[in-house]
Amino acid sequence: MADADPKIETSAGTEVTLEPAAPARKRRGLLRPILMFGVPLIVVAIAGYFWAISGRSVSTDNAYVHQDKTSVSADVAGKIVSVDVRENQHVNAGDVLFRIDPEPYRIAITQADAAIANAQVELQTLQTSYVGTGADIQAAKDRIKQAQEDYDRQAALMKQGFTTRANFQAAQHALEQARAAYQSALADAAEARSKLATGSAVPGQNPAIAAAVAQRNKAMLDLQRSVVRAPISGQVSQTDRLVLGQYMMAGLPAVTIVADQNSWVEANFKETDLNHMRVGQPAEVSFDAYRGLKLKGHVQSIGAGTGSEFSVLPAQNANGNWVKVTQRVPVRIAIDEKSPRQLIAGLSADVTVDLRGGK
């Protein structure tokens, strides 16, 4: 019959009924337009999505964590007699780092005290001398008076002819000597008074005493500075430079303290990424060392020059051998939230800046 299912007889004499192929052809017929139109639509939708979100942000993995670093040196020279910190130890501002031999500066204080005492004795001597000049002036005045009387008497006798010219000239010479002695006494008094002057720089204080006091103050300051303390709070590094008995030169960097309160990221963006970047735009920072950690931040500043511009050997492009290379510009990213993990200077980071935000 025409409606009967087709059958095939096998070599074994059995019959196999074949299923109709129409449903399979029908499914293939439906799948073909789906593949022809659906896949291109999906591709177009995905491309449209990426086109729509493109330009909203820029990112770079050429970024590193930076922290304030303070190089600590001794203000005075001397042998190191004590080291109070170890490598990577956290210190607070004011904690003792190391000590320099204080004995030379204690001796300097003693010498300054002796200089003060010597200046005080000298001042007392000058004051006594000045008082003595007053008596010398009065004595010179008395001698002038007596010499004047002798001269007047000899002059009167000379007119009467009762004295010799030699006696008259001797009286005249004695009067002149008395007057000269008076002038000398006045000069000595002026000199003694000038030595007691204080001057406008240190009014009311003898210069010699002021110099000795300044010497003592410096010696005391040097003694105080023989104990080197941490200027900021942070983590101590490079303590291997501190060796007991080693002579420390003044101003020579001894240790470094990495501040723990101020961290930022320096991201080196391509110059082609800066067209729409502005200060204040939000940013997201992730770290290679801490997978899954993301911190919020913002663009704090954009560098004034490219990295190559501030390198030790800047590129010279006027030699005829020039090949254009995309430059990198350092962008400072401020971190706006406290990190649950310790941020270490030099860590690699990834930075994404949202160009739609900010000013």
Image (spheres, rainbow, N blue to C red):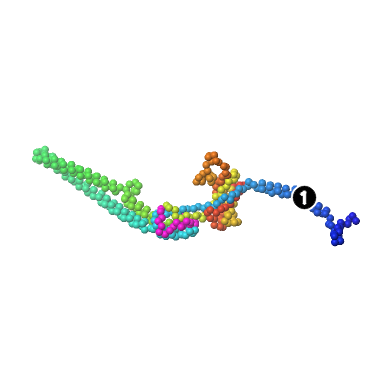
Left or right of 158 in this view: 81: right
Residue 238 location, x and y as percent?
A: 47, 56
Residue at coordinates 9% horizontally, 40% vertically from top-left? 162
Residue position for label 1: 32
Whether residue 181 is visible to the viewer of this picture, yes or no, is yes
Residue 190 location, x and y as percent?
A: 26, 45
Q: 153 and 232: which one is in front?
A: 232
Residue 278 location, x and y as percent?
A: 58, 45
Whether residue 90 is visible to the viewer of this picture, yes or no, is no
Residue type for callout 1: Arg
The span shown in magenta is 230-250
Is residue 93 covered in magenta?
A: no
Residue at coordinates 28% horizontally, 53% vertically from top-left? 121
Residue at coordinates 45% horizontally, 56% vertically from top-left? 241
Residue at coordinates 57% horizontally, 47% vertically from top-left? 269
Disc 1 secondary structure class: helix
Q: Name the image quarter holding residue 158.
A: top left
Residue 202 location, x and y as percent?
A: 34, 48
Count the labels in the image. Answer: 1
